[in-house]
Amino acid sequence: MRWIGFLSRVAFICNVCFLVATVVKWIPNPPTGELMSAIVVLGYLVAVWINAIIFLCYALLLLLKKPLKQHIPLWLIFVNLLFLISELILLFK
């Protein structure tokens, strides 16, 4: 069960990269370089997939009647859900 907590935290980091990459799109002269490339890849590619995997795992654990909040803070679940919704809206837009 520790791995789901770890993956939730990794998803949060990728979601922050998604937020940074989205904000950078609106800057007139966006920064370039390897760090920015890594942020864009983590934000736009990895974040969507890891969020989908995380919420499938959450659903599976709920079906098995395993308690989530003992291993994952509720704020982290909520924030990752908000990011997943915004990523899906941006993806299908």
Image: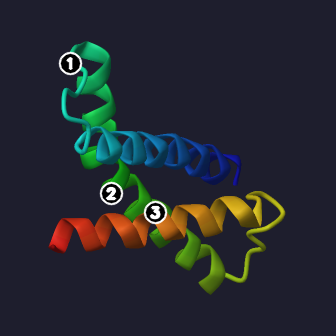
| Crowd tier of the residue under label 2, counting other residues whose Cα lies within 10 Å: few below 14, some 14–19, many 20 or above | many
Where the C terminus falls, by quadrant?
A: bottom left
13 to 78, vertically: above or below: above
- Label 3, on which residue? 83
- Give whichever of 85, 52 is nearer the camera: 85
- Of the residues under marks 3 and 1, which one precedes in the sequence? 1
**Residue 49 picture quarter:** bottom left
**Residue 87 picture quarter:** bottom left
Q: CA distance from mark 3 to mark 2?
A: 9 Å
Between disc 2 and disc 1, the foreground one is: 1
- Of the residues under marks 3 and 2, which one precedes in the sequence? 2
Q: CA distance from mark 3 to mark 1?
A: 24 Å
Q: Are marks 2 and 1 in contact (CB under 8 Å)?
A: no
Left-right relation of 27 to 77 = left
- Label 2, on which residue? 48
- Of all residues, the one furthest to the top in this rendering is 33
Q: Of helix, strand and loop, which one carries label 3?
A: helix
Q: Of helix, strand and loop, which one carries label 2?
A: helix
- Of the residues under marks 2 and 1, which one precedes in the sequence? 1
Q: Position of residue 64 (x, y in %)?
A: 65, 81
Q: Position of residue 90 (x, y in %)?
A: 24, 66
Where the N terminus falls, by quadrant?
A: bottom right
| Crowd tier of the residue under label 1, counting other residues whose Cα lies within 10 Å: few below 14, some 14–19, many 20 or above | few
- Of all residues, the one furthest to the left in this rendering is 93
Q: Residue at x 23, y 25 (%)?
A: 37
Q: Of helix, strand and loop, which one carries label 1?
A: loop
Query: The residue under label 1 is which amino acid type?
Result: Thr
- Label 1, on which residue? 32
Between disc 3 and disc 2, the foreground one is: 3
Query: The residue under label 3 is which amino acid type?
Result: Phe
- Give whichever of 8, 86 is nearer the camera: 86
